[in-house]
Image (tube, rainbow, N blue to C red):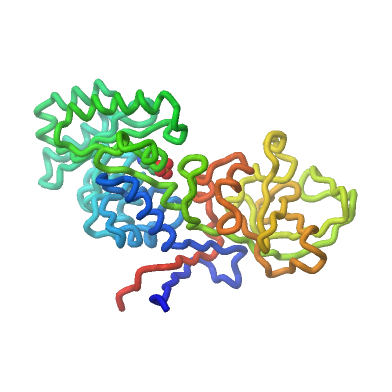
């Protein structure tokens, strides 16, 4: 017998909710450990932006901290504050940076480290550091080919050469982000690596970070001092063919099973005409719960290029019939037999029986979007919580 497994339940009561989300923190920790092995000497940070990809900062951050993770990346100051609450001593980098003086004061109060990406936030942080006796630490983000946030390589070198500036603020990390890390042979990977090498040389002694999940798999040359895997920790495939342990399973409740006749239509627009007598399971999940409308079985433009979405019940695939609606979706359960599915059963949307990357592909999207869109109307179970100290 192992230790008892602690489960935290949150959100609406499970007997009243239209669906359930299981987050297996043991699998998450195992993924983190596997990535740490690949990272070798590089430190593995936790990327917990967007409430840990929808899984919950309050649960994910302590799980990663228990594996020794002491550096986190978030997008916004709010997420930074939540992360600070869950990891009192960790370094917390805020990727979207500063956009006001008030923000700088808030960052200092919560010991958040701003990621500076342009002249505006550098000026704000410099002014803040000149007038306050707080931590001057910051991260410099350099754009090496994504054209998202970041200084140009030239601006970064000018920064490094500006002695007054480098005395006023204290860069503790220089980072950049890959555009095509999931395409191993894309020529932009090498070009970004070379550009980043030039930036790094301008900041001797300052730790450097380039790789996200897929970048981590491109090899040692991409690791530098800190790697920043997100999706792979949460169980998504960082590159095609690479399997991680399943962390999240989402299931929707069947509210009703209907018998529909050949020739009848299903859902809005009557776009799906039944070509046989059909058992239709109506499930309590819709696009308001993060099931993309583009996973409709028919009747949305993407249907022309995609096979349409499906769920899984008792290990069998069940196709979506017609359009996904706001709160309800219809599934064809005919092939499971006349009495196999009943009201109260659950249809898996992705997870242990249906890889999230496959579910995403059938909707024309990516695992990231399915995770971050996960319904707050579903009951959540975090399995494998650290034992809570007695209050
Ligand atoms: C989201 C993000 C990551 C993590 O990316 P994954 O593809 O989820 O591993 C790393 N770095 C930055 C700057 C990011 O925005």
Count of labels shown? 0
Q: Nearer the viewer, residue 21 or 222?
A: 222
The N terminus - image quarter: bottom left
Residue at 60%, 52% in the rendered image: 288
Above or below for 21 versus 123: below
Above or below for 18 versus 107: below
Residue at 27%, 50% in the rendered image: 71
Q: Is residue 231 left or right of residue 100?
A: right
Figure quarter occupied by ligand 1: top left
Kindly indicate the quadrant of the structure image that contains residue 167.
top left
The C terminus - image quarter: bottom left
Percent across and percent down for residue 312 are 66, 57
Percent across and percent down for residue 120 are 26, 30
Kindly indicate the quadrant of the structure image that contains residue 30.
bottom left
Query: Which residue is farthest top?
Result: 154
Residue at 65%, 51% in the rendered image: 326
Residue at 44%, 60% in the rendered image: 27
Q: Is residue 2 left or right of residue 309?
A: left
Res 164 visible: yes
Res 147 visible: no
Q: Nearer the viewer, residue 149 or 1?
A: 1
Percent across and percent down for residue 355 are 57, 51
Percent across and percent down for residue 31 are 41, 54
Q: Nearer the viewer, residue 345 or 390?
A: 345
Q: Is residue 84 left or right of residue 213?
A: left
Q: Is residue 126 left or right of residue 240?
A: left
């Amino acid at each position: 017998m192992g230790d008892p497994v602690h489960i935290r339940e949150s959100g609406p009561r499970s007997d009243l909710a239209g669906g359930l989300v299981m987050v297996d923190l043991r699998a998450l920790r195992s993924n983190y450990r596997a990535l740490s092995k690949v990272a070798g000497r590089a430190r593995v940070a936790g990327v917990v932006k967007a409430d840990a990809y929808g899984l919950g900062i309050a649960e994910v951050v302590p799980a990663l901290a228990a594996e020794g993770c002491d550096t986190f990346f978030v997008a916004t100051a709010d997420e930074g504050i939540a992360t600070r609450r869950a990891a009192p001593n960790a370094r917390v980098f805020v990727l979207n940076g500063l956009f006001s003086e008030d923000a700088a004061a808030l960052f200092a109060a919560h010991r958040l480290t701003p990621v500076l990406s342009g002249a505006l936030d550098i000026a704000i942080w410099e002014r803040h550091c000149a007038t306050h006796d707080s931590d001057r630490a910051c991260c410099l983000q350099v754009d090496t080919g994504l054209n998202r946030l970041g200084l140009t390589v030239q601006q970064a070198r000018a920064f490094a050469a500006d002695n007054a500036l480098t005395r006023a603020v204290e860069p503790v990390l220089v980072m950049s982000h890959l555009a095509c890390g999931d395409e191993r042979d894309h020529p932009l990977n090498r070009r970004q690596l070379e550009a980043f090498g030039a930036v790094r040389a301008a900041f001797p002694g300052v730790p450097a970070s380039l790789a996200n999940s897929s970048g981590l798999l491109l090899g040692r040359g991409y690791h530098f001092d800190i790697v920043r895997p997100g999706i792979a920790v949460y169980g998504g495939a960082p590159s095609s063919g690479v399997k991680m342990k399943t962390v999240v399973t989402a299931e929707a409740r069947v509210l009703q099973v209907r018998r529909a006749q050949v020739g009848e239509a299903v859902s809005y627009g009557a776009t799906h005409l039944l070509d046989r007598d059909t058992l239709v399971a109506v499930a309590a999940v819709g696009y308001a719960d993060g099931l993309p409308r583009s996973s409709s079985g028919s009747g949305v433009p993407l249907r022309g290029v995609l096979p349409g979405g499906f769920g899984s019940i008792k290990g069998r695939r069940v196709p979506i019939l017609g359009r996904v609606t706001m709160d309800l979706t219809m599934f064809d359960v005919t092939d499971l037999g006349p009495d196999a599915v009943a009201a109260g059963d659950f249809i898996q949307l992705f997870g242990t029986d249906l890889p999230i990357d496959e579910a995403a592909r059938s909707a024309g999207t990516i695992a990231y979007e399915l995770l971050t869109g996960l319904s707050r109307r579903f009951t959540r179970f975090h399995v494998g919580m650290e034992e809570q100290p007695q209050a």
